[in-house]
Image (spheres, rainbow, N blue to C red):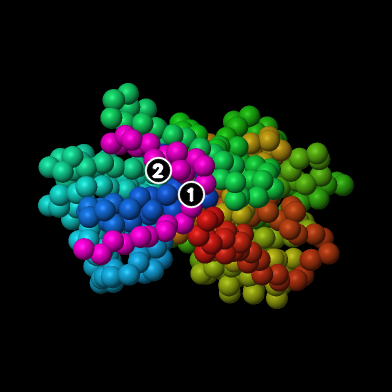
Amino acid sequence: MTNLTVELPPLHPSQKTVFEADYRFKTLACGRRWGKTRLGSLKCVTIGLCGGRAWWVAPSYPMSNVGWRLIKQLAVVIPGTELRQSERSIIFPGGGSVQIKSADKPDSLRGEGLDYLVMDECAFIKEDAWSEALRPALADRKGGALFISTPKGINWFFRIHNSGADDWHHWSFPTSDNPYIDAAEIETAKTSLPERIFRQEFMAEFIDDAGGVFRNVMQCAIAEPQEAAIDGHSYIMGVDWGKHNDFTVLTILDTTGEIPRQAHTDRFNQIDYTLQVGRLKAVFDRFKPFSIIAERNSMGEPLIEQMARDGLPVQAFTTTNATKGQAIEALALAFERQEIGILNDPVTIGELQAYEMERLPSGMLRYNAAAGMHDDTVMSLALAYHGVYAASPAAAGQTVEVDIDIYKSDRQRSRLWQR
């Protein structure tokens, strides 16, 4: 028999505490970039090296690739290890194994006996995957499990994280607990993100109704409607286009006072594009906004070109997940601080209160209307508010494309093992 000595990468102090704790079931609620994926991948590899069978289970196939990359990075330097790319599994010299699984089809998780299980971002996995498929797989070998996730409201992960059973133990750590994360980065996030998002994503707090994005909506419903421009006031317009199922919404913000206030909104659908531009011109003539921030995507391109030819001060906004996120987060922060006034309009208020966020497999956040609802008034308002700070009267008559990827630095950091 040949003895194999393997030196694994070091853990920071809190990771080491969780790793070495002798409990069968462990839950770990952590802020983003704390290092929970690194911890889980090391645990899987350790089980495999000791001859056990471990699974890494993620909410979806794309999200599972994060763990797969880290586990491969560890395994390829171990002599005698067999890498099976098509199965996304690793066989270690002593016969142990680690396999990557996706929980988007819970029935595919049945049938295997396991020594250990890591459920990555388990707050985003359906509870049935654990209770009906994975928990029974641990029974015959009396296997253990590590549940790692950023919180997502009050769901089943919250319940197991507060379990009082003897063989369970629970930890919560904010992002700042990772000594390799620059404190200035966290402070920037705190000042630029809505409080609810920061508390969930960086402080690892379980926030009730965490899918909601906008707070203090009713407290901000203080603006008075205006039928036309008031002398001495300046205005900006945000435009979200629609035709059939969606609505075109024009939002006018009065930028004159201490905070921007919604002065007018126009919402319509199922009319020809030419008529839409005509209706926009009518609102423009009444308020003479110094800039029109209009979505460029889809049908927006030709409409913006027509507006520019007609001499309107249009600025194009190219909507990507990143640019949309930036605009929505800025608007949410304004509501958080009550630094915007909106009309007491039931459609706008309803869309704002129902607006949701979700985490993508890449780890980025995506903002959308709730199922069965629209978000046209939200986007129109977000574009207008974005324009208050991104546009200026000097830009009149120019078409400017906005395409800012605020997640670039985060993606670059994700390549670094420790972070």
The image's mark for residue 11 is 1
Give x and y (percent) for residue 400: 70, 70
Q: What's under tag 1, amino acid-wise?
A: Leu
CA distance for labels 1 and 2: 9 Å
Residue 410, picture quadrant: bottom right
Taking the image as drawn, is residue 70 in sight? yes
| Cβ atoms at labels 1 and 2 below 8 Å apart | yes
Callout 2 secondary element: helix
Q: Quadrant of the C terminus?
A: bottom right
Element under label 1?
Answer: loop
Foreground: 42 or 205? 42
Looking at the image, can residue 347 be seen? no
Q: Is residue 43 above or below residue 241?
A: above
Identified by mark 2, the residue type is Phe
Question: On the image, which quarter does residue 143 sit in?
Answer: top left
Q: Residue furthest right?
A: 232
User: Principal SS element in the magenta part?
Assistant: loop
- Residue at 71 percent of width and 56 percent of height: 387
Range covered by the magenta-colored residues: 1-26
Question: What residue sits right under mark 2 in the picture?
Answer: 19
Residue 257, given in percent of the width and then of the height, sits at 81, 40
* 310 shown above or below 114: below
Which residue is painted at 52% across and 56% down in the image? 418
* Horizontal and vertical percent position of residue 403: 63, 66
Q: Is residue 401 left or right of residue 1?
A: right
The magenta stretch spans residue 382: no
Q: Residues within 10 Å of mark 1 (few under 14, many from 20)?
A: some
